[in-house]
Amino acid sequence: MKLTVHPGETVTVVNHDSATHTLTASPGSAFDTGPINPGKSATFTAPATAGVFPYVCTIHASMHGTLTVG
Ligand SMILES: [Cu+2]
């Protein structure tokens, strides 16, 4: 999934799935929601600098996307 946010923005992630997921910057450590249980949400602060930040779900290796900050 591709997401686009503004630098420093507070981003809320809602897990609409039936499994627990994370949204974790990788490579790097720019953001990490930690585990988000089904039906729950988590917030993180977007990086303060513009760029494209790949992310993964640390629980499901096949799940990944990019967060574009600009
Ligand atoms: Cu997952």
Image (cartoon, rainbow, N blue to C red):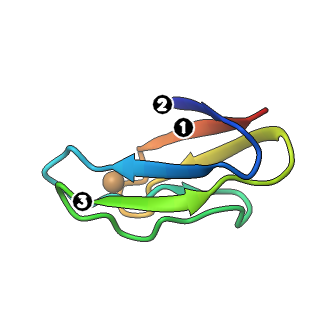
Residue 29, percent across and down? 70, 67
Element class at badge 3: loop
Task: Please identify the quarter of the rendering in which residue 30 is found.
Answer: bottom right
Q: Does any atom of ligand 1 lie closer than 8 Å to the CB of label 2?
A: no
Q: Which residue is mark 3?
A: 40
Asked whether, in this view, residue 24 is left or right of residue 49, the answer is left
* In the image, residue 65 above or below residue 25: above
Q: Amino acid at mark 2?
A: Met
Q: Nearer the viewer, mark 3 or mark 2?
A: 3
**Mark sitting on residue 65:** 1
Residue 4, percent across and down? 63, 31
Residue 27, percent across and down? 71, 57
> Going from the N terminus, do you reach mark 1 or mark 3 first?
3
Q: Residue furthest front?
A: 9
Q: Which residue is mark 2?
A: 1
Q: Amino acid at mark 3?
A: Lys
Residue placed at 74% from the left, 62% from the top? 28
Task: Please identify the quarter of the rendering in which residue 21 is found.
Answer: bottom left
Residue 25, percent across and down? 63, 57
Quadrant where the C terminus lies?
top right
Asked whether, in this view, residue 39 is left or right of residue 45, the answer is left
Spatial CA distance of label 3 from label 2 is 19 Å
Q: Residue furthest bottom?
A: 34
* In the image, residue 21 above or below residue 1: below
